[in-house]
């Protein structure tokens, strides 16, 4: 069985690449970003992973959130959010088509106001994944 840590170890380097990080003035984080951050950051969260013993397939869900400071209070920075989102989607789609045992399916994307950081919004990308174990 794989853990959420194992999946993060697979996904983090896929997202933390030059084509994505050049859209940021912050960085890519695992699980959370500094609460006082005002930079354009990306956070990868692993929500859950199903599993058990004697299985050869596991399903789970990850979220990739792209954060940007609002242009004005309540007005998201759509241009930067879009640039970050497009970059993340491109690397995830490229990885999914080349992966042998980890399949990614982009389920949804939407923009939300960050309730923890006033004056910040984020683009949230929800991805379902399936890990299929290779035969020995």
Image: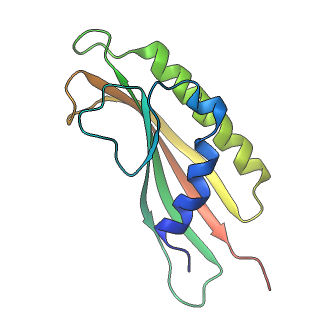
Looking at the image, residue 97 lies above or below residue 112: below
Residue 65 picture location, percent across and down: 42, 38
Question: What residue lies at 53% left-to-right and 26% top-to-bottom?
Answer: 84
Question: What residue lies at 76% left-to-right and 48% top-to-bottom?
Answer: 97
Residue 91 picture location, percent across and down: 67, 39
Residue 6: name its quadrant.
Answer: bottom right
Residue 119 picture location, percent across and down: 23, 21
Question: What residue lies at 55% left-to-right and 75% top-to-bottom?
Answer: 2
Which of 115 and 36 lies nearest the eye of the viewer?
A: 36
Query: Among all residues in the image, which is located at the extreme bottom?
Result: 54
Relative to 92, 48 lies left or right? left
Q: In the picture, which quadrant includes the C terminus? A: bottom right
Looking at the image, residue 41 lies above or below residue 60: above
Looking at the image, residue 43 lies above or below residue 85: below
Relative to 116, 7 lies left or right? right
Relative to 135, 70 lies left or right? left
Q: In the picture, which quadrant includes the N terminus? A: bottom right
Residue 33: name its quadrant.
Answer: top left
Residue 107 picture location, percent across and down: 53, 45
């Amino acid at each position: 069985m794989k853990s959420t840590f194992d999946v993060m170890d697979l996904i983090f380097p896929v997202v933390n690449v030059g084509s994505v990080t050049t859209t940021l003035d912050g960085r890519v984080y695992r699980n959370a970003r500094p609460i006082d951050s005002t930079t354009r950051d990306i956070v990868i969260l692993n929500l859950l992973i199903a599993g058990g013993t004697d299985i050869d397939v596991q399903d789970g869900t990850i979220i990739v959130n792209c954060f940007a400071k609002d242009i004005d209070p309540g007005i998201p920075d759509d241009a930067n959010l879009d640039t970050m989102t497009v970059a993340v989607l491109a690397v995830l789609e490229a990885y999914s088509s080349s992966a042998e045992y980890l399949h990614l399916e982009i389920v949804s994307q939407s923009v939300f106001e960050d309730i923890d950081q006033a004056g910040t919004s984020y683009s949230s990308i929800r991805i379902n994944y399936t890990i299929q174990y290779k035969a020995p």
